[in-house]
Amino acid sequence: MTTPPLFSALQVMQDAPVIPVIVLTDVAHAVPMARALVAGGVRMLEVTLRTPQALACIEAIARDVPQAVVGAGTVRSRADAQAAAQAGARFAVSPGYTSAVGQACRDAGLALLPGVATGSEIMMAREDGFTELKFFPAMQAGGPAMLKAWSGPFFDIRFCPTGGVTLSNAPDLLALPNVVCVGGSWLVPADALAQGDWARITQLARDTQKLQGK
Ligand code: 3PG
C-alpha cells in the first residue's frame, strides 16, 4: 500500500533557498528552535536521525509547530523511514541511495531527497523515479564544477547540494540551472542551541532570504 506524500520533493526544495540540516541532542530545544527558524522564514526543517533524541524532536515539532514542515535527515534504512513517518516527518533526506530506502519512503508516504555523489548513483535513483536529488557531500565531492559537468548527461535532474555549503559559497551553487536549493547546518549552530540563543537562529535564517532559490 502506497500513501501519497503531502509534499513532493520539489515542493520541499522550492520552499526556501536553504534547507537547514539540524542535529538535536535535547528534546527541549526542538520546539523553540523550530519556531526560531519559522520566524526567520525557513519552514522546511531537516532533523537528522543522528542522536537518540531525534525522533522525539521530530514528534515535538510536528505536534507543536504547525507552521513548520518537519522532515527526517540521515534516513539510511527502511526502519528509519518508518520511524520518521510515525514520528510525524513529512519528508526524508538520505545521505546515499538504495532502492530499499526509496521504496520504504514511498510506502511511508514520505517525499524523499536521495543523496548521490556519482553518476551511477544518479542513474539508480532516476531508475526508481527520483529526479530531485541531494548532492552529498557537495563541496567535498566536486562542488559547482561537478554540478556543471552533470548538467549535460543528467539534464533532467535537479539538485540540492549539501555538505560544506555556507552563506558565502551558496550563491555560486544557486546560480546553476540544475540547483534548486542548498542544504546546510550553519543555520542551527550547536552553541546557539546550548545557549538557547533563538534570536541568533532566527537571524541566521533571515540572512538566507537574500539568497535566490528557484
Ligand atoms: C550533513 O549531513 O552533515 C550535512 O550535509 C551538513 O553538512 P554541513 O555541516 O557541511 O552543512
Image (cartoon, rainbow, N blue to C red):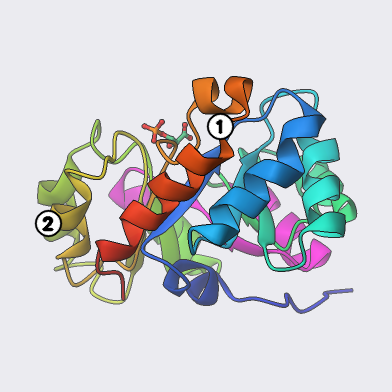
Relative side of 175 to 129, left or right: left
Mark 2 neighbour density, 10 Å: few (under 14) some (14–19) many (20 or more): few
Of badges 1 and 2, the one in the foreground is 1
Residue 197: numbered disc: 1
> Where is residue 136 drawn, in percent x and y?
38, 41
Which region shows up in magenta?
98-120
Residue 186: numbered disc: none
The reply to whether the magenta stretch includes residue 164 is no
Quarter in which the C terminus is drawn: bottom left
What residue does disc 2 label? 149
Residue at the (60%, 31%) spot, across then down:
23
Amino acid at the residue labelled 2:
Ala
Amino acid at the residue labelled 1:
Asp
Quarter in which the N terminus is drawn: bottom right
> Where is residue 188 drawn, in percent x and y?
50, 36
> Where is residue 149 drawn, in percent x and y?
12, 56
Position of residue 189 relative to residue 16, above or below, is above
> Where is residue 172 drawn, in percent x and y?
13, 54
Position of residue 149 relative to residue 31, above or below, is below
Position of residue 34 relative to residue 30, above or below, is below
What secondary structure is marked by label 1? loop
Ligand 1 near label 1 (Cβ, under 8 Å)? no
